[in-house]
Amino acid sequence: MGEDMKIGEWHFPEELHYDEHHQWLKREGNTIIIGLTDYGQYTRGDILYLSLPEAGTQVKAGEAVGSLETGKWVGRFYAPQTGEICAVNAEVLENARLINQDPYGLGWLFKIKTHSSEGQMLMTVEQLKVWLDRELEREKACDV
């Protein structure tokens, strides 16, 4: 892994891209690997159950493609770009806590094969910092 940036108490590898669903993306040729960020797993809590799309599923950018449940939360995963699910991490389906333990490594979720570069707005780690700092401020304001 390359350098990490720390935002609050969470780590974000600098070589990855990020979206507003607290997912990280790593492009390898035509394939994009998708996972949940350190902050994403932290705010959701211990992940108890996971549902992910099957390999071969066609997905559209922005579409919900899977879900997760924690003690306090049910959430969705989203396809950041249009394409086809080409791999799903069987390990996390067996043991969802891997996402909590190693969000950028063993805890990856699925891979999409894509031929389009269009998709949701992705952020670099610098852009993510600006966005997340604002989000965290907003949450603080609500806690008062």
Image (cartoon, rainbow, N blue to C red):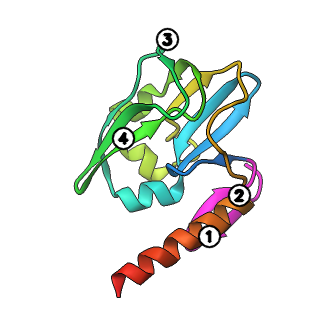
Near mark 2 (Cα within 10 A), the count class, few <14, some 14-19 or many ≥20, is many
Near mark 1 (Cα within 10 A), the count class, few <14, some 14-19 or many ≥20, is some
Quarter of the image for residue 139 reads bottom left
Measured in 3D between alpha carbons, the distance from the residue under mark 2 to the one under mark 3, in whole angstroms, is 30 Å
> Does residue 144 appear left or right of residue 110 in this picture?
left
Front one among 9 and 126: 126
- Queried whether the magenta region covers residue 2, the answer comes back as yes
Query: Which amino acid type corresponds to the residue marked 1 in the rendered image?
Result: Ile
Dot label at residue 7: 1
Measured in 3D between alpha carbons, the distance from the residue under mark 3 to the one under mark 4, in whole angstroms, is 22 Å
Measured in 3D between alpha carbons, the distance from the residue under mark 1 to the one under mark 2, in whole angstroms, is 9 Å
Tell me which label, 3 or 4, sits earlier in the chain.
3
Measured in 3D between alpha carbons, the distance from the residue under mark 1 to the one under mark 3, in whole angstroms, is 36 Å
Query: Which amino acid type corresponds to the residue marked 4 in the rendered image?
Result: Ala
Residue underneath mark 3: 56
Residue underneath mark 4: 96
